Every structure is written in structure tokens, then in C-alpha cells.
Image (cartoon, rainbow, N blue to C red):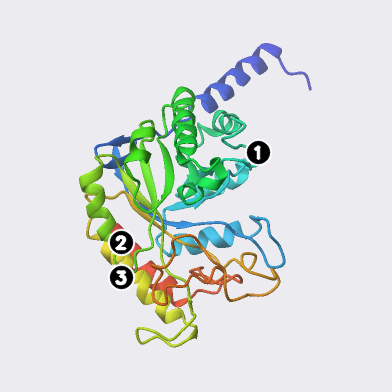
């Protein structure tokens, strides 16, 4: 069958035009709020780094099941610690009605990292994808001056320059950084190009103390880039038994969420750490180990000891922990 070339050319132009005219969400800031297409957006989220059993690298093999569970829990935002360079995964996130905070590390051997500048390549590639909410630079690197010749000024200068570069490339998405607890005057003064501040907060069950500090320190939007509790008690405390204790995690996360949601005029969201248990973090990746440490984590409820492989709201087999149901109730009720 012969096809008229002029008709084929015209059809191609129409198809290309339809793709090109696909509306791109505009994410911006207004006062203390994150806005999506002019409407306030509050992150009811979860940190997501799914590493399977007997592995140390992230895998999206369970993405469909994971997104279904997240949707059930009322989650609207994922936070990932390294870029997702698979458009089909971003498409799944978008189709699930969710958005993602894309994190860039400082030195990832040139893979979309800040040190090499290759993060800009990723932004150019995906800046028009509607799954994207924010670009996020680093994860509590302020706890590691040894990575920056012992001087955090080098880190703050790096993220400020990276944020400026991102603004030149992409005007539709704000730039954030995930800071360990409250930024100090050095962080603020050296990072004026940061639009939104993420804060990893572990202050027992009362993160609102930080929110009130933020109100006095900055008029920019802020969100909790990490908050929560693990499901293992190293010692019996506060009425909770030693050992695996899902009730302790559920009670703590419920109080943390409640404390946060009392101040939605000052905060733009909370991302619970984390979606699934991580067997790779503290020992043999083929079994769940007790132990592991994290900087400045003595505020973890209720034993002041973060057991790094027990933080999931589901276990590694995607069985719901008790905290899942608490989060489901609170997030879905807040969204009403």
C-alpha cells in the first residue's frame, strides 16, 4: 500500500505537536508554601530506597506493588536519594498520582553528581517530566565536614553554585537541600540560591520544636526530608519491650505526624523514613541484622538507638507493619 508522503508528513507534525504541547506542571514557591500549578502542595511522603534481600543496590522490580501500597497509605510524594534514570519508572509514579523529590549526591563517581556537574545532564533530560517535584542536593552532608577538606563552607558553596546552575536550566522546579537538623547561620548565608530547605529531624516525638525555630530563622518553605522511628527496641523503655517492637514504631510515628500537622502554615510536608526495611545497611544483606548507626540520631524514639535495618513502614517482603495503618489513617484523613 502506498502512503501519500505529504499526508504522512502532516500526520507526523500533528503527533509531534501533541507531544510538545503536553502541559508541564509548574512547581514554584510562594511565601512558605510549595505550589503546583498555583495551588499549595503538602508532601505526605515517604523516603524510598528499595534494596532487595541479598543485595546492596536499589531495584525497582517491586515498583507496581510499592506504589499501590503507598497510594493506599495516602502517600503523595516519594523521596529518593539518587536519580531515577528510567523514564518508565517516572511514568509509573506520575500515573499513580504521585510526585518525587530527586536527590543528587556530591561525589557519585560522575554519575549525575554535584562534583562532576553531571547532575545538570539529568535535569536537562527530565525537567519536563510531571513526576518531578523538587531537585534536592545532598543528604545531611553537614554531618560530614571530612568529605569537604574539613570545611563545610566548601559544601555550602557547592550547593549554592549547583542551585544557580539548576535555575538557569529549569525554571519550573525549586531547588532544595536535605540538611541534618536546623541549619545554622553559615548554611543560610552561604546558600541563598536554595529555594526550599529539607530537614532530617530526629527530635524524639516532638519535631515541632524545630518548626518553631524555623519560623524565627527563615521565611522560605521547609519540609521534613526525614522523620520517624524504627521498629526495634535495643532496650526496654517507655513501656515498650526490648526486641522487634512494631507498636513502639507505630505510636512514635503517629505522634510525630500529629505534631507536624499542627503547623502546616509553617511547613510544606513530611517524608517518613522509610518505605521498606533495608537489610543491606548493618550486616549480612541476606538477613535482618540489629545495629547500625547514623549521625546525630540519639533523638530516635523510644530507645535513642537507630537500628538501621528496621525503619520500614513495610518489611522487606512488603508485609504491612503496624505503623503502616497509623500513617494510612493520618495521611488520608489530612487529605480530606
- For disc 3, the marked residue is 255
Q: CA distance from mark 1 to mark 2?
A: 34 Å
In this rendering, is residue 97 above or below 207? above
Percent x, y for residue 190? 38, 33
Camera-nearest residue between 300 and 165 = 300
Secondary structure state at the residue bearing disc 3: helix
- For disc 1, the marked residue is 111
118 left or right of 24 in image = right
Picture residue at 62% right of the left edge, 44% below the top: 88
Q: CA distance from mark 3 to mark 2?
A: 10 Å
- For disc 2, the marked residue is 207
Q: Which mark is residue 57?
A: none
Camera-nearest residue between 89 and 50 = 50
Percent x, y for residue 211? 26, 54
Which label's residue is closer to the chain start, 1 or 2?
1
Q: Is residue 336 visible?
A: no
In this rendering, is residue 335 above or below 320? above
Q: Crowdedness of circle 2 by 10 Å Cα count: few (<14), some, many (20+)?
A: many
221 left or right of 230 in image = left
Percent x, y for residue 111? 65, 38
In this rendering, is residue 321 above or below 257? below
Which label's residue is closer to the chain start, 3 or 2?
2
Camera-nearest residue between 82 and 234 = 234
Which label's residue is closer to the chain start, 1 or 3?
1
Q: CA distance from mark 1 to mark 3?
A: 38 Å
Q: Quadrant of residue 38?
A: top left
Secondary structure state at the residue bearing disc 2: loop
Which of discs 3 and 2 lies nearer the camera? The answer is: 2
Percent x, y for residue 266? 24, 49
Amino acid at each position: 500500500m502506498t502512503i501519500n508522503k505529504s499526508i504522512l508528513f502532516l500526520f507526523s507534525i500533528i503527533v509531534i505537536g501533541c507531544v510538545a504541547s503536553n502541559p508541564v506542571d509548574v512547581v514554584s514557591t510562594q511565601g512558605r508554601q510549595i505550589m503546583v500549578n498555583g495551588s499549595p502542595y503538602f508532601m505526605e511522603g515517604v523516603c524510598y530506597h528499595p534494596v532487595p534481600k541479598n543485595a546492596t543496590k536499589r531495584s525497582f522490580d517491586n515498583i507496581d506493588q510499592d506504589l499501590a501500597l503507598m497510594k493506599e497509605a495516602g502517600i503523595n510524594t516519594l523521596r529518593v536519594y539518587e536519580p531515577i534514570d528510567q523514564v518508565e519508572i517516572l511514568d509509573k509514579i506520575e500515573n499513580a498520582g504521585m510526585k518525587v523529590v530527586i536527590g543528587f549526591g556530591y561525589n557519585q563517581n560522575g554519575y549525575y553528581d554535584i562534583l562532576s556537574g553531571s547532575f545538570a545532564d539529568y535535569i536537562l533530560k527530565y525537567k519536563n517530566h510531571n513526576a518531578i517535584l523538587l531537585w534536592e542536593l545532598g543528604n545531611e552532608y553537614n554531618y560530614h565536614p571530612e568529605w569537604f577538606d574539613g570545611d563545610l563552607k566548601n559544601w555550602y558553596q557547592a550547593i549554592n553554585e549547583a542551585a544557580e546552575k539548576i535555575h538557569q536550566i529549569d525554571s519550573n522546579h525549586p531547588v532544595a537541600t536535605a540538611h541534618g537538623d536546623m541549619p545554622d547561620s553559615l548554611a543560610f548565608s552561604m546558600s541563598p540560591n536554595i529555594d526550599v530547605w529539607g530537614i532530617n529531624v530526629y527530635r524524639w516525638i516532638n519535631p515541632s520544636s524545630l518548626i518553631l525555630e524555623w519560623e524565627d530563622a527563615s521565611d522560605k518553605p521547609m519540609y521534613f526530608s526525614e522523620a520517624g522511628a524504627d521498629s526495634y527496641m535495643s532496650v526496654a523503655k517507655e513501656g515498650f519491650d526490648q526486641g522487634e517492637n512494631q507498636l513502639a514504631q507505630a505510636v512514635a510515628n503517629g505522634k510525630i505526624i500529629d505534631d507536624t500537622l499542627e503547623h502546616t502554615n509553617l511547613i510544606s510536608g513530611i517524608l517518613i523514613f522509610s518505605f521498606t526495611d533495608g537489610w543491606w545497611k548493618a550486616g549480612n544483606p541476606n538477613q535482618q541484622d540489629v545495629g547500625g548507626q547514623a549521625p546525630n540520631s540519639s533523638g530516635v524514639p523510644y530507645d535513642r538507638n537507630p537500628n538501621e535495618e528496621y525503619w520500614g513502614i513495610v518489611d522487606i517482603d512488603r508485609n504491612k507493619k503496624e505503623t503502616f495503618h497509623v500513617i494510612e489513617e493520618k495521611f488520608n484523613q489530612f487529605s480530606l
